[in-house]
Amino acid sequence: MPTPTSAERRPLRADAERNRRLILDSARDLFACKGLHVGLDEIARHAGVGVGTVYRRFPDKDALIGELFDDRIQTLVSRLDEAATIPDDWEAFRAFVATFAQMQAEDRGLKELMFSGDRVGRKDVAREQIKPRVSAMVGRAQAAGVLRADLAPPDLALVNIMLGTLADAARDVSPDVWKRALTIVLDGLVVAREGVTALPGEPLDTDQIDTTMRASVARR
């Protein structure tokens, strides 16, 4: 049997790349919406390919997560760096914290990668890139006298855990309610200002609070 020529093999390579892109796009959507517990079978169904195709491209879910989230972490780092270029010290700090909160609110998988105990290696790599940026931003805002002096960089990790938990739990009743919580937190961190910041959106009603609390407990 004659050996296929390079020209004959190209369509296969194009198909393989198309399938790889479909798998990555589907995984990104599902991880963002549902978290990292999504299995390769569900990703294959969402992508419209056979599960065998997924395994040919990625030997296991960790390999898929690695390729997908290396890019997401770099996007986060780039956006944090962009926030740090804002000339006004308080606005830079506000944008820095809001960027982190928004990305984890939009991407449940990213939040889990950053704050869960699973896949420690990737979490640690991400933290190695983010930790010095957080320290630099806190130091800048405190040196400028706009951020309370007793805030430590690890405190922002707790803020992000709180906001991420709220964003997850309230996703079905009020997906942007985390913005109200963030505004309240930031007003508690600024050293001095005239008046208070207007809160975005509307407060949750009693039924929405109950739904959010049940969702929060269910995800533990």
Image (cartoon, helix red, strand yellow):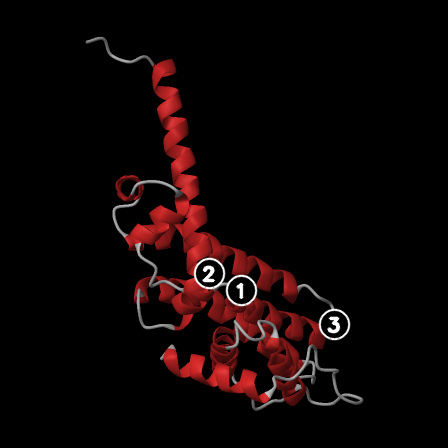
Q: Quadrant of residue 215?
A: bottom left
What is the distance, in whole Å, between disc 2 and disc 1 at their CAs?
7 Å
In the image: residue 67, left or right of residue 207: left
Secondary structure, mark 2, is: helix
State whether residue 58 is above or below residue 182.
above
Report helix, strand or loop for mark 1: helix
> Residue at horizontal 47%, vertical 85%?
213
Q: Nearer the viewer, mark 2 or mark 3?
A: 2
**Residue holding disc 2:** 32
Contact flag, marks 2 and 1 (Cβ < 8 Å):
yes
Residue 35 image offset from top left, x and y in percent: 40, 64
Residue 70 appears in the figure: no
Q: Measure the alpha-carbon separation of dots 3 and 1.
A: 26 Å
Q: Quadrant of residue 187?
A: bottom right
**Helix, strand or loop status at disc 3:** loop
Q: Are marks 2 and 3 in contact (CB under 8 Å)?
A: no
User: In the rendered image, which residue does mark 3 sit on?
Assistant: 88
The percent coordinates of residue 149 (x first, y second) are 60, 89
Query: In the image, which disc is placed on residue 106?
Result: 1
Classify mark 3: residues with Cα within 10 Å, few (<14), some (14-19) or many (20+): few
Mark sitting on residue 49 = none
